[in-house]
Structures are given as structure tokens and as C-alpha cells.
Amino acid sequence: MKYSALKRGVGFMRCLKNFWHDRVAMAATEFALILPVMTILFFGMLEGSDALTIKRRISHAANTLSDLAAQSTELSPTEIDDLFTGIEQILQPNGQSTLTYTLISVIRDPNGNAIVHWSRNNAGIEPLQRGVTYTNIDDDTLLNDQTSLIVVEMNYQYKSSLTHQIFKAPLTFSENVKRWPRQTTRVQLCDPAPTNCTT
């Protein structure tokens, strides 16, 4: 009798031990299956959050540049470069080697076409020649014969500075912001000599 009870007790302990080992093995299997998914979610949230932050900064920088330029009556190349320097501070501490942006004044010619009044980019050159057709205006009613339109085109190639696990290829963020001049009908680009301005 006592032997039978002892045998049953040993059998119960053995079953309990086997059950415990089975549970450990099952937990390890579940962990192995879930780990890749959790890793992708973690890095995806991390890199996605960083990308959204950069996109917001690009949008803020483009809107600020267009707004500051639209508040002027005339700008010199030096003043535009100063605006560019201030705008680049918004994007710190992110690298700016892939950042390109252009400040453009667009007017309407006698035929009703949108043309470049003047332009300048962050490389310090005139990327669009005066008088060439400007095609990045969706609504023709934004322009009339007397006024100009300040346009900022900004492009940034984002590459994650964190892990490069999810966004392996660079993402391109683009902004095209338009503003009407606030204090004049047309913002003029003037050389250091005040008499040499656009018309």
C-alpha cells in the first residue's frame, strides 16, 4: 500500500516535471517566433519617428523661408544667403549634405504665362534663368499682371542615422511652398548697387 502510494507520488512528480519542461520549451518556441516581429516593430517605430521629425523640420524650414522672403520689398544676394543660413539652423543637428532648396520669384508675362522673375539656391547660383517658363504652379489665378509669387522648392534625401534596418534606401522629402509678397506687389532682387534691381 505504502509502495503503491509512493509510486503514485513519484509518477505525479515526474509528470509535473515533464509538464514544466514542456512549458519552458513552448515559451522558448513562442519567443523565437515573436522576436523577429517585435524587432521589426521596434526599429520601424524608431526610424519612422525619426523620419517624421525630419519631414516636419523640412516643412517648417520651407514655410519659414518663404514667409521671411515675402515680408521683404527687395533682397540682395547677401540677404538671401543670410536667410538660408538661418533656415539651415532649423534642420540641425541633422546632416544637410543632401539638402537642396531654391528661392524663386514668379511673375506673369504679357501672354499670361508664369515665368521666373529671379531665383537663387543654396549653392549661391541662379538655377532658373529669368524669363523661363515656370511650370510648378497648379493654379493660374495665384498670379496677375502686377504681382509676383514667392516660391520655395526644398528637397531632402533622408537616410536613417539610427539603424538602417527598416528604411534601407533614402527617402526623399519635398516641399513646394508659395507666398504672396506682403509689403509690395513684387519682391525685387537687387545687386549691392541699389539701382540694379529686377523689375
Image (cartoon, rainbow, N blue to C red):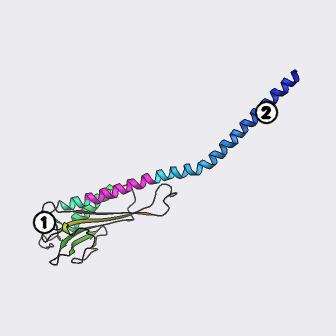
Pick the residue in front: 133 or 6. Answer: 6
Is residue 75 magenta-colored? no
SS type, badge 1: loop
Query: Over which residues does the magenta segment extend?
Result: 48-64
Rendering quarter of residue 152? bottom left
Please provide percent x and percent y for residue 2: 87, 21
| Residue drawn 73% across the image and 38% down it | 21
Distance, label 1 to label 2, CA atoms, is 91 Å
Q: Which numbered marker is on residue 14?
A: 2
Rendering quarter of residue 87? bottom left
Q: Point out the frontmost of discs 1 and 2.
A: 2
Q: Which numbered marker is on residue 120?
A: none
SS type, badge 2: helix
Please provide percent x and percent y for residue 39: 55, 50
Disc 2 marks which amino acid?
Arg
| Residue drawn 27% across the image and 75% down it | 128
Disc 1 marks which amino acid?
Thr
Q: Which residue, given by chain and number where applicable, does mark 1 sit on? A: 185
Is residue 61 magenta-colored? yes
Please provide percent x and percent y for residue 169: 48, 64
Could you tell me what secondary structure mostly forms the magenta stretch? Answer: helix
> What quarter of the picture does the N terminus occupy?
top right
On the picture, is 128 further left or further right than 49?
left
Is the residue marked by circle 2 packed among few (<14), some (14-19), or many (20+) residues within 10 Å? few
| Residue drawn 69% across the image and 39% down it | 23
Callout 1 touching callout 2 (CB < 8 Å): no
**Mark earlier in primary sequence (1, 2):** 2
> What quarter of the picture does the C terminus occupy?
bottom left
Please provide percent x and percent y for residue 131: 21, 78
Is the residue marked by circle 1 packed among few (<14), some (14-19), or many (20+) residues within 10 Å? some
Rendering quarter of residue 8? top right
